[in-house]
Image: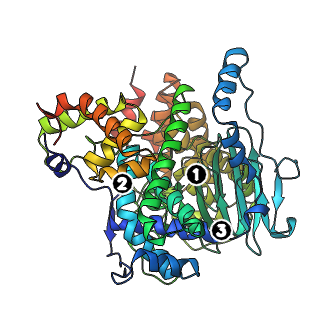
């Protein structure tokens, strides 16, 4: 039996570069479906990347991405400053990830967690990555597993996703000082695998 | 890898356009579904309740594990507390929706007929007789959901999808999560669909090839297919792996198949009538009837028990004119797939007795030797002698003698 799969190009919907988030939020609140999708298109990349890295599981991440935008779009009225949409949606996403961690922990305790960590750092290595680099990524994955959720999240959002410390702190709903402290805790644990001196 | 930038350079970006498209399709669908005021949605309070009990739930579960293993969940119930069972239609409910106590919902379109075949703590099985229905299955539940429609089985855990049973095909479209679509006419026998995917599976397999389109577009009816899978069905099913399906609903389908009347159908080159060498069906046997086609479809779907039951019914039906063919097919199934040599030998003998015509007659005599050799050496030798008498230069000569002399 042969099975051939052909992918046709996906048409990307236009995303306005002229409208800022505040304007898009205003239009979305008034029921403009195009504005809703434009908001999604503008921020889905950041949310998908962060959520996938945090959860390490593609299927879980897709659920959380969907939950995040469903929640955000349904609660737009609660957002006072439309220009703050990005930080707001990031905070929702990280909060939902933490809910998912709690659920996963409970399932693991009960022996019911059967998820597949298909999006860990090692699993996400680009094609052609040297084996020693993949081994390092695997060590980092293991080190991250040993961290608290808060420290792990801070490290991934800042070091891997490149979020600023301010964005990271806001998403984790902690002060900047707390975010730095958690990041430092994570750096200490992970530095040995990244070479002397730790992260930049 | 001291530098964060270097670290990122080693990693693939999780985001891609197809994924974003799929997620948006799912989001749009969920929001449409949620346009019902939240206050009127059943069990909306459950999420608040979950938050309220918070850590207490963990403690309660720990206590339950310590002192008494929790009882297995029972069958799904409707909102009024009755166990969901039997045949339902849109008229059965005020809003044409079967709302279940785990929060899952099944919305029936006009004309749909849905039967709840099995309802237990670990699985629930529906049969969509006709029409279309949308299933919104709450993720994380203890039950495996399966929806039968025609020859297609859709298996899910937590997801949202729609099944439409049409005259000659079944369409499955997924709005959230992942489903497995199994069926003899599905490409490869099984397809995994993700959010935004759509597949149309025909009931009938053309003699040589079949095509099914998987459409990931949101506007399924208007947009072109984004993925197209083409499966070539092998001329005989001898190398085809059976379905891994182990569910037990199958008696219903078999009953339905057995009950179906034998009406004339166009000739086919389905494997049912072919020998292991790919011999063509004997035209003298007459055109395969609906029941033979159904049996063949069941066999190809791995539902061997059902196929055997149906073939046995045909053999015992004095009014059927394809009894010999059914007996021969039954013999092959018992011998090659079920490893039941006694039943196989009996079936081959019955095929000969019922007058199966060449070239399958020679095959039947040879395969009877093969079956007998596995449990009755003397009978195998006798059957081999019978084969030699009728086919002194037969195609199976060497094999027959090897079988009859096997220790």
2 vs 1, front mark: 2
Q: Residue B155 carries which label?
A: 1
Q: Spatial distance from mark 2 to mark 1, Cα to Cα?
A: 41 Å
Viewer-closest of B209 and A51 = A51
Mark 2: few/some/many CA within 10 Å (<14, 14-19, 20+): some
* Quadrant hosting residue B245: top right
Q: In which quarter of the image is the N terminus of chain A?
A: bottom left
Q: Spatial distance from mark 1 to mark 3, Cα to Cα?
A: 22 Å
Chain ID of residue with mark 1: B
Q: Is residue B209 visible?
A: no
Q: Spatial distance from mark 2 to mark 3, Cα to Cα?
A: 33 Å
Eyeballing the image, is B177 above or below A172?
below
Chain ID of residue with mark 2: A
At 47% from the left and 70% from the top, the residue drawn is: B206
| Left or right, residue B112 beside residue A5 | right
Q: Name the residue under label 3.
A: B33
Mark 3 lies on a secondary structure that is helix
| Left or right, residue B108 beside residue B237 | right
At 12% from the left and 33% from the top, the residue drawn is: A197
Q: Can residue A6 be seen in this view?
A: yes
């Amino acid at each position: 039996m042969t099975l051939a799969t052909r992918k046709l190009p996906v048409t990307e919907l236009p995303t306005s570069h002229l409208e800022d988030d505040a304007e898009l939020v205003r239009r979305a609140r008034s029921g403009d479906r195009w504005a809703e999708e434009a908001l999604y298109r503008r921020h889905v990349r950041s949310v998908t990347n962060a959520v996938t890295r945090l959860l390490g599981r593609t299927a879980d991440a897709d659920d959380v991405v969907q939950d995040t935008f469903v929640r955000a779009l349904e609660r737009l009225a609660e957002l006072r400053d439309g220009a703050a949409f990005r930080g707001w949606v990031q905070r929702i996403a990280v909060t939902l990830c933490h809910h998912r961690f709690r659920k996963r922990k409970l399932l693991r305790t009960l022996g019911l967690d059967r998820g597949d960590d298909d999006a860990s750092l090692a699993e996400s290595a680009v094609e052609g990555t040297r084996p020693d680099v993949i081994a390092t990524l695997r060590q980092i994955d293991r080190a991250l597993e040993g961290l608290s959720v808060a420290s792990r999240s801070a490290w991934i959002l800042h070091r891997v996703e490149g979020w600023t410390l301010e964005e990271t702190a806001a998403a984790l709903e902690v002060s900047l000082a707390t975010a730095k402290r958690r990041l430092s805790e994570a750096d200490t644990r992970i530095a040995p695998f990244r070479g002397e001196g730790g992260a930049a | 890898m001291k530098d964060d930038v270097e670290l990122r350079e080693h990693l693939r970006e999780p985001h891609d356009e197809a994924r974003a498209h799929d997620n948006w399709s799912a989001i749009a669908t969920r929001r449409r579904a949620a346009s019902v005021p939240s206050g009127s949605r059943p069990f909306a309070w459950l999420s608040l309740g979950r938050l309220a009990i918070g850590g207490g739930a963990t403690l309660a579960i720990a206590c339950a594990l310590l002192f008494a293993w929790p009882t297995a969940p029972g069958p799904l119930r409707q909102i009024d507390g009755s166990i969901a069972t039997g045949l339902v239609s849109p008229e059965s409910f005020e809003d044409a929706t079967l709302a279940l106590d785990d929060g899952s919902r099944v919305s029936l379109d006009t004309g749909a007929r849905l039967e709840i075949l099995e309802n237990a703590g670990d699985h629930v099985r529906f049969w969509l007789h006709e029409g279309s229905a949308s299933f919104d299955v709450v993720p994380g539940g203890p039950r495996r959901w399966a929806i039968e429609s025609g020859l297609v089985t859709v298996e899910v855990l937590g997801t949202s999808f729609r099944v439409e049973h049409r005259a000659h095909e079944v369409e499955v479209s997924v709005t959230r999560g992942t489903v497995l679509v199994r069926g003899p006419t599905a490409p490869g026998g099984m397809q995994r669909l993700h959010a935004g995917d759509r597949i149309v599976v025909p009931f009938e397999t053309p003699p040589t090839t079949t095509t099914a389109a998987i459409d990931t577009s949101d506007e399924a009816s208007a947009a072109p297919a984004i993925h197209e899978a083409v499966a070539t069905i092998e001329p005989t099913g001898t190398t085809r792996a059976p379905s891994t399906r182990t569910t037990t609903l199958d008696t219903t389908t078999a009953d339905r198949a057995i009950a179906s009347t034998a009406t004339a159908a166009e000739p086919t080159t389905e494997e049912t009538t072919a020998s292991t060498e790919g011999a063509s069906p004997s035209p003298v046997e007459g055109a395969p009837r609906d029941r033979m086609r159904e049996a063949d479809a069941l066999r190809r779907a791995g539902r061997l028990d059902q196929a055997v039951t149906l073939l046995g019914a045909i053999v015992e039906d004095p009014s059927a004119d394809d009894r010999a063919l059914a007996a021969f097919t039954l013999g092959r199934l018992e011998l090659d797939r079920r490893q039941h040599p006694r039943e196989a030998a009996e079936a081959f003998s019955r095929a000969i007795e019922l007058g199966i015509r060449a070239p399958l007659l020679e095959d039947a005599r040879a395969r009877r030797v093969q079956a007998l050799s596995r449990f009755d050496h003397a009978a195998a030798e006798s059957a081999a002698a019978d084969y030699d008498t009728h086919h002194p230069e037969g195609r199976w000569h060497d094999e027959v003698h090897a079988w009859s002399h096997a220790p």
